[in-house]
Image: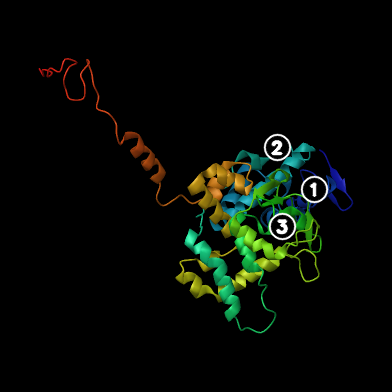
Amino acid sequence: MAFLTREDAYVSDHSTVDELALWWLDRKRALGALASGTLENYTTDAKHVVEHFGKLRLSELTIARSEAIIRTLAKRDAPLARRVHKTLKAMLADAVRVDARKTNPLAAFAAPKLPKAEIYTLAPEQAAILSGAYREWLSQRDKPGPKPDPRVADMLDVLLALGLRIGELLALRHCDLRLDDPTPTLHLRATLTDGEKGEPVWQPHPKAARQQRTIVLPALAVTALRPYDDGSASRSPIFPNRRGGWSRPGNVRRILRNFRDEWREPLERAGIRHGQVTAHLLRRTLATLIANEAGIYRATEQLGHASVLTTERHYVTPAPVVGEASAALIDSLFAVAPALTSGGADQDGKDEDGAALEHG
């Protein structure tokens, strides 16, 4: 029987799941530098595992018992059940790898399936209304306290025009923009993550390193970014905080929540579900607009996804009316189709000598 030691824990087949969780988190820290957000996610997921499995010993984790706990949890909270399944499966895989267990019972059954979530996006006219609605809210707001950041209106325009994540938008620097080139572009190089104390940290690549790319800017983005760009090649933020540093994505999300809650009735009158107004809504909206006009592959390229399936499953709503371009193409092909001829007969039903054809 293998025993894996650390200063205050032992992990073996007789250990409890909460002891396994402590060892697993230490192992994650020891294997290499992790972004603070990633480590926080591991810690949160481990807490969920401990909540539902913590007092069980590893030797008590049979396939049937483990599956029963997961399925019971799924009836109440399917997303949480999937997270618990995934995390405990990873913990036990590490235990098997170092001979603390012989088998991984979580590998014997699949995680619960999630019901397909509705993909909500805005119609083009609703998207055009949104930043104007934010500006109107600001002009009419009379609550005491600091005024919400007016730059958020322009941020909404950039998010809608480019489909960026909020962290990618706030990580933009002056050296990333080329607004005065014949073809204005933006070089997407980075995103913001949370530091150990929750402060925003500039990460030198987007969510995945392969997502670094140069994006051609439509006029909407150029107009929105122009007031903030000084044309320099400095590495300072386009949208800095009051001290000139990186702005917190959470602050922008909080402002959007206040806006949508206080401006609920005007948004609902425009057919916009106020509770769905987030920065990510604009990313999905742009993906849908591009996919319906130029195809799903263009939308995947714009958002930087590795797979078209990600774009299709989570970002794009089908067009309500399809086939207009195809119908026009078919009409153009068959509008002047000649009648079929055979045996040397011309279109008047006569042979080459002009005699009428006999019909038997």
- Dot placed on the residue nearer the N-terminal end, 3 or 2: 3
Residue position for label 3: 44
Q: Badge 3: how crowded within 10 Å, few (<14), some, or many (20+)?
A: few
The amino acid marked with disc number 3 is Thr
Q: Residue at x 69, y 48 (%)?
A: 87
Q: Position of residue 229 (x, y in %)?
A: 73, 62
Quadrant for the N terminus, please. top right
Q: Residue at x 60, y 76 (%)?
A: 138
Q: Quadrant of residue 154?
A: bottom right
The amino acid marked with disc number 1 is Lys
Residue 174: mark: none
Residue position for label 2: 103
Q: Position of residue 258 (x, y in %)?
A: 61, 73
- Give the Cα distance between marks 3 and 2: 25 Å
Whether pointer 3 and pointer 1 mark residues with C-beta atoms closer than 8 Å, the reply is no
Whether pointer 3 and pointer 2 mark residues with C-beta atoms closer than 8 Å, the reply is no
Q: Badge 1: how crowded within 10 Å, few (<14), some, or many (20+)?
A: few
Q: Residue at x 45, y 71 (%)?
A: 269
- Give the Cα distance between marks 1 and 2: 21 Å
Secondary structure beneath dot 1 equals: helix
Residue position for label 1: 28
Front one among 30 and 24 = 30
Q: Residue furthest right?
A: 7
The amino acid marked with disc number 2 is Thr
Secondary structure beneath dot 3 equals: helix
Q: Is residue 338 visible?
A: yes
- Dot placed on the residue nearer the N-terminal end, 1 or 2: 1
Q: Is residue 280 visible?
A: no
- Dot placed on the residue nearer the N-terminal end, 3 or 1: 1
